[in-house]
Image (tube, rainbow, N blue to C red):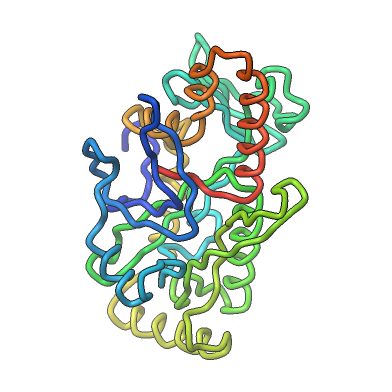
Amino acid sequence: MLKGLAITPPVVGRVSIGRMVERNGKRLPEKDDQFTLTSQVQNREGWVLHPLDEELRKDAGGKLRAIPVRMLFNDPALNLRADYSMFDRTTGRPLCVGNGETCRRAGSDGIESLPCPSPDACSFAMGDCKPYARLNVVIGDEDAMGTFVLRTTSYNTIRTLTARLNYFNAVSGGLLACMPLTLKLRGKSTAMSFRTAIYYVDLVVRAGMTLEEAITHAGRLDESRREAGFIQVALDEAARKGFAAGGFEELAEDSPSVAEEFYPEMDQMQQAETPHATTSNLHSRLEQKVERLGGVAVG
């Protein structure tokens, strides 16, 4: 295995909420109230839709607000990796990744291990560090190991998905990878959102099933897999070693997407050189803070 290169789950597509649009020559995120499944290919109009997007959208009657999924691993932390992350705003490359106790920071001498005081108390980040999570899910039956990745900086999404994954793993007796689940888009209003809806991602059992029925299904699937020679424990361990092999999960080729998705305010702040620029920038920053609390990455 190559040292310094994180081996991550194979990705065949992306799950996002919203899309990037071009305004006044700048690419900016546009909010949406539904999921979009894309491939990993972009053209001039943006990300190319994955064939499953149309298929699931027809089943849903147009608005895609629920996606049937299953997890690839039993260990919740392998399916959802959440960190405090700081990226270079220009290149999108990771500079520092931590968990509130320790961090890995890129420097002139390579990657260092240092204490992590969390974003609010970090003098190095100066406000540029925020929660960042990647959730890998399997959608459809075409590729048993191919996943779609959902990237998010939303506190609500990270907290909800972390709880759900751990709870489902617990009640199923460690059979999380066999549970029939659904990604569900939920809306909520807060004082910070000025009573407008903000959206976050939840995880529930498959539609039409009770929790008990989902657990029974998981037990039967696990049994049939074992009979076929499928070793879930070995798969989890292989993934654990793969993640540990690299300092950072993101590759250099992912950097432009990270910069575009999580630092769009740089373009916004550079746009206006008018008497109203300060007010516009403050409004934009407030909107971005609301997005971090309740939204997921778009693009």
Q: Is residue 284 above or below residue 269?
A: below
Please report the residue visible at 63 percent of the width from the left and 19 percent of the height from the top: 276
Specify the quadrant that holds the C terminus: top left
Q: Nearer the viewer, residue 230 or 121?
A: 121
Q: Is residue 164 above or below residue 255?
A: below
Q: Nearer the viewer, residue 288 or 12?
A: 288
Image position of 224 (left or right of 129): left
Residue 4 seen in render: no
Please report the residue visible at 63 percent of the width from the left and 14 percent of the height from the top: 275
Q: Is residue 175 above or below residue 234?
A: below
Image position of 143 (left or right of 31): left
Q: Which quadrant holds residue 21? A: top left
Q: Is residue 37 above or below residue 270?
A: below
Please report the residue visible at 49 percent of the width from the left and 44 percent of the height from the top: 297
Residue 41 seen in render: yes
Across and down, in percent, residue 129 comes to 63, 29
Q: Residue furthest front?
A: 275
Please report the residue visible at 70 percent of the width from the left and 29 percent of the height from the top: 116
Across and down, in percent, residue 192 comes to 74, 46
Q: Which quadrant holds residue 119? A: top right
Across and down, in percent, residue 258 comes to 43, 33
Across and down, in percent, residue 153 comes to 57, 43
Specify the quadrant that holds the N terminus: top left
